[in-house]
């Protein structure tokens, strides 16, 4: 092999073969797929993202959400485990409620980029739009540990603004205890000295609020602790956390993710 | 009687030493420019990696700003180490090895400074752009849209220059390393352009994008880093131990089998996904066939090394290279197994894949390039490495670090996959289970970073002329015996790289 031309032509041919087989053929097969419509009166599926949800896709992209969350549901025959009787079973993705069926290429014809994802540090999001409410999503995005103690997802508090309430509390404001809102993105607790000071200043009103909600069992030895826990779950006075435009867009995008819900003929097992 | 025979041999040696010195002098500037940039990106990439790794087990670490959120740091890390460190080291290897093996001097080096600068600007805008919020979320191609033109231009110049050196070759025999380099500088620009075109410039529909994406993601390793790193090992091992490559035919087989089969793998990243079944099957076949080139190369390197393993005790370049070569065999076998559907169903969405990827790009590619640096840089600067102790720190941090990384994430990832496949196990339990393994990964990351700091210190000291003038290599310990340098005739007959 002392001739450059042999190497060049060989490299060209081998590489072209894979380009032809892995790129060009799938391109011909899949690039012109159309939405599904049973009869002309029905709305076709899927529909392209629009408005706020489309803007939210960019936020999802910018922050690399797909590096922990896939958007694809594997078939009922995929992924095996053994149940309590030692019986082998399959199809965890669907049983976890991540979709009613496996996802197929038609689910993605309006995705750009198509963020299938290759990692499940967090759960799959193909149908996350039907799994949670908008309010849940906002709370969870702001600080995931406000909902799941064990979560290792980053706080996206930078997508929210903390502001002084002027007039009435906004309808969009997050409903969270002060432990999550005093230092946005983190979980806050007062030091013992701070807590003493707070008790001295507002002790009576905190106690009366506690009694109003829990009855008057504030005489036991751990009452101070319980009072603190209670106070931490109450909303911070005078301040609110509201989503920025980016957060609103991101949640609109998540709420629009409803893949693997609409039945498609080719997705039957 | 011995006198007349010895004299011409000595002159021959002097002449070829002078020729080598002239070749090294011609490519010194550009190669040092690329190697220095690569080291800078390695340090930046390590730092980003460490931040990302810590964030995965301690989510409150640096959580306040959008620039340092996990997703962005992870993407920036990949660009810094793949496009910065690995690619620029690959380019340096291509240039220097091609000049040496072709016995040709580099012409118009100034344009290569332009290429290196374009490349650096490309990586810089990629890393900064991602951190500031312009990321694409296309795996391996997260660089913002304004970065690819820089890479394309920089890469174009490099490819043209490597071809030009090859065409000006004085040495009629084309050594195996040159095949790999020629193929790589031809494959990668094509691969990159096709991909950028089909994903960004004229986006394909739906799942065609991930198909193109993984064709790229797998081939950037298979057709760019791997050929050049394997080629580098083919050069360094025989050079250092002064012994020819075991079998010419095995190297031919290894090369063509890699060319044919590696490019067909890649779709196994989408097994179980919404793509045509035949596509994943084709790639599974390609992956299984990869056993052929990998075994060919493994036998060839092992048989070349046989009887010379004691040299690992003193030669840093050889020790790094052999570590890399062994990791190549291991990671390739593992990759083929991972492409099997039954295995893939478990590990597909887990840290197991992350461990595998790092064994490839670090345990194999980076380790061989470290070996190349230890061999090549003294020949370019005329200075020896200043401290065997720092080389030792680098080696052991890298070797222990990547092993800890690989072992911890492989075990954690496997069980993560098993638990994900069982819908009765709540998600929180999987996260709790993974935490110790994620901490172990951060410890591995600290080790790797310390190693890189030792390496960078050595490198900078060498550049600034702190080592002793070159007479013989800096060894871990002084060897007991010396081997004669192969003569040109013996080399030609037995296929030792001559230059």
Image (tube, rainbow, N blue to C red):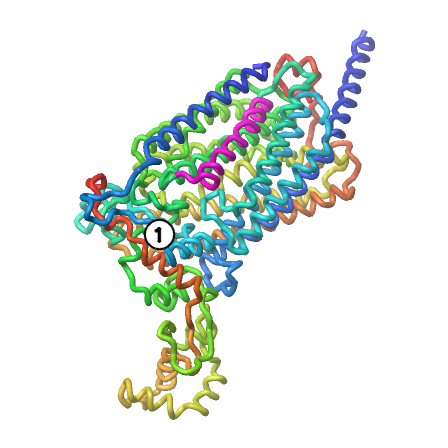
| Circle 1 residue | A49
State whether residue B118 is above or below residue B440: above
Left or right: residue B237 versus residue A246 is right
State whether residue B191 is above or below residue B496: below
Q: Secondary structure at mark 1?
A: loop
Indicate the position of residue A181 as horizontal and vertical percent values.
Answer: 43, 74
Quarter of the rendering occupied by the C terminus of chain B = top right
Indicate the position of residue B405 as horizontal and vertical percent values.
Answer: 48, 47
Left or right: residue B369 versus residue B213 is right
**Residue extending furthest front?**
A41
Indicate the position of residue B486 as horizontal and vertical percent values.
Answer: 69, 19
Q: How many numbered markers are drawn?
A: 1
State whether residue A235 is above or below residue B317: below
Callout 1: residue from which chain? A
Part of the protein shown in magenta = B177-204
Quarter of the rendering occupied by the N terminus of chain B = top right
From the image, give the main secondary structure of the stretch colored magenta. helix
On the image, which quarter does residue A249 sit in?
bottom left
On the image, which quarter does residue A26 sit in?
top left
Left or right: residue B59 versus residue A266 is right
Kindly tell me whether residue B446 is visible in this rendering: no
Kindly tell me whether residue B326 is visible in this rendering: yes
Residue at the spot 45% in from the left edge and 58% down from the top edge: B57
Which residue occupies the foreground of this view, B309 or B29?
Answer: B29
Which residue occupies the foreground of this view, B81 or B133?
Answer: B133
Would you call the spot at circle 1 few (<14 residues within 10 Å), some (14-19), or many (20 or more)? some
Q: Is residue B202 magenta?
A: yes
Indicate the position of residue B27 as horizontal and vertical percent values.
Answer: 72, 31
């Amino acid at each position: 092999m002392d001739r450059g031309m042999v190497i060049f032509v060989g490299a060209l041919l081998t590489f072209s073969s894979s380009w032809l087989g892995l790129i060009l053929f799938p391109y011909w097969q899949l690039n012109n797929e159309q939405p599904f419509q049973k009869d002309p009166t029905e709305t076709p599926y899927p529909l392209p993202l629009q408005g706020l949800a489309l803007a939210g896709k960019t936020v999802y992209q910018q922050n690399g959400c797909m590096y922990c969350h896939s958007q694809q549901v594997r078939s009922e025959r995929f992924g095996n485990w053994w149940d309590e009787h030692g019986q082998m079973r399959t199809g965890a993705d669907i049983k976890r409620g991540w979709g009613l069926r496996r996802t197929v290429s038609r689910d993605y014809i309006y995705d750009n980029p198509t963020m299938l994802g290759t990692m499940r540090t967090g759960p799959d999001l193909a149908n996350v739009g039907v799994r949670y409410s908008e309010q849940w999503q906002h709370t969870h995005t702001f600080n995931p540990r406000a909902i799941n103690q064990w979560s290792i997802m980053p706080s996206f508090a930078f997508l929210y603004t903390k502001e002084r309430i002027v007039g009435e509390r906004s309808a969009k404001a997050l409903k969270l205890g002060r432990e999550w809102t005093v230092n946005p993105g983190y979980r806050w607790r007062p030091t013992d000295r701070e807590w003493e000071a707070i008790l001295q200043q507002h002790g009576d009103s905190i106690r009366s609020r506690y009694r109003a909600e829990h009855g008057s069992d504030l005489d036991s030895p751990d009452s101070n602790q319980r009072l603190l826990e209670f106070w931490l779950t109450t909303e911070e006075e005078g301040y609110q956390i509201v989503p920025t435009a980016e957060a609103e867009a991101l949640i609109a995008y998540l709420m629009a993710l409803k893949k693997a819900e609409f039945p498609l003929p080719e997705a039957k097992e | 009687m011995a006198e007349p025979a010895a004299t011409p041999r000595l002159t021959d040696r002097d002449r070829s030493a002078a020729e080598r010195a002239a070749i090294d002098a011609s490519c010194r500037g550009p190669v040092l420019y690329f190697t220095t940039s690569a080291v800078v990106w390695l340090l930046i990439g390590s730092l980003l990696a460490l931040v990302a790794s810590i964030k995965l087990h301690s989510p409150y670490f640096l959580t306040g700003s959008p620039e340092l959120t996990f997703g962005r740091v992870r993407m920036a890390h990949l660009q810094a180490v793949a496009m910065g460190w690995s690619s620029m080291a690959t380019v340096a290897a291509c240039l220097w090895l091609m000049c040496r093996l072709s016995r040709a001097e580099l012409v118009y080096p100034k344009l290569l400074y332009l290429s290196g600068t374009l490349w650096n600007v490309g990586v810089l805008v990629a890393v900064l752009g991602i951190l500031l919020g312009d990321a694409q979320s296309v795996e391996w191609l997260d660089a913002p849209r304004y970065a690819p033109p820089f890479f394309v231009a920089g890469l174009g110049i490099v490819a043209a220059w490597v071809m030009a050196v090859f065409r000006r070759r004085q040495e009629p025999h084309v050594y195996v390393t040159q095949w790999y380099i020629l193929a790589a500088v031809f494959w990668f620009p094509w691969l990159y352009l096709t991909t950028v075109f089909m994903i960004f410039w004229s986006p394909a529909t739906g799942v065609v994008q991930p198909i193109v994406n993984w064709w790229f993601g797998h081939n950037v390793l298979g057709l760019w880093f791997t050929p050049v790193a394997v080629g580098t090992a083919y050069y360094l091992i025989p050079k250092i131990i002064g012994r020819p490559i075991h079998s010419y035919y095995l190297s031919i087989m290894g090369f063509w089998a890699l060319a044919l089969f590696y490019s067909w793998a890649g779709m196994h990243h989408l097994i179980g996904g919404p793509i045509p079944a035949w596509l994943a099957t084709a790639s599974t076949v390609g992956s299984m066939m990869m056993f052929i080139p990998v075994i060919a190369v493994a036998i060839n390197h092992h048989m070349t090394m046989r009887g010379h393993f004691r040299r690992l005790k003193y030669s840093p370049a050889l020790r790094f290279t052999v570590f890399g070569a062994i990791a190549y065999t291991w990671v390739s076998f593992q990759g083929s197994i991972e492409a099997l559907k039954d295995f893939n169903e478990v590990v597909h969405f887990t840290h197991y894949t992350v461990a595998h990827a790092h064994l490839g790009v670090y345990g194999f590619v980076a380790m061989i390039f470290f070996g190349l640096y230890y061999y090549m840089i003294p020949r370019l600067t005329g200075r020896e490495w200043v401290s065997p102790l720092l080389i030792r720190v680098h080696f052991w941090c890298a070797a222990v670090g990547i092993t800890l990384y690989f072992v911890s994430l492989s075990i954690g990832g496997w069980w993560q996959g098993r638990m994900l496949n069982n819908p009765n196990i709540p998600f929180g339990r999987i996260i709790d289970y993974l935490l110790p393994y994620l901490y172990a990964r951060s410890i591995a990351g600290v080790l790797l970073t310390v190693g890189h700091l030792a390496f960078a210190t050595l490198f900078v000291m060498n550049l600034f002329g702190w080592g002793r003038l070159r007479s013989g290599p800096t060894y871990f310990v002084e060897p007991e015996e010396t081997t004669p340098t192969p003569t040109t005739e013996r080399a030609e007959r037995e296929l030792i790289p001559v230059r």
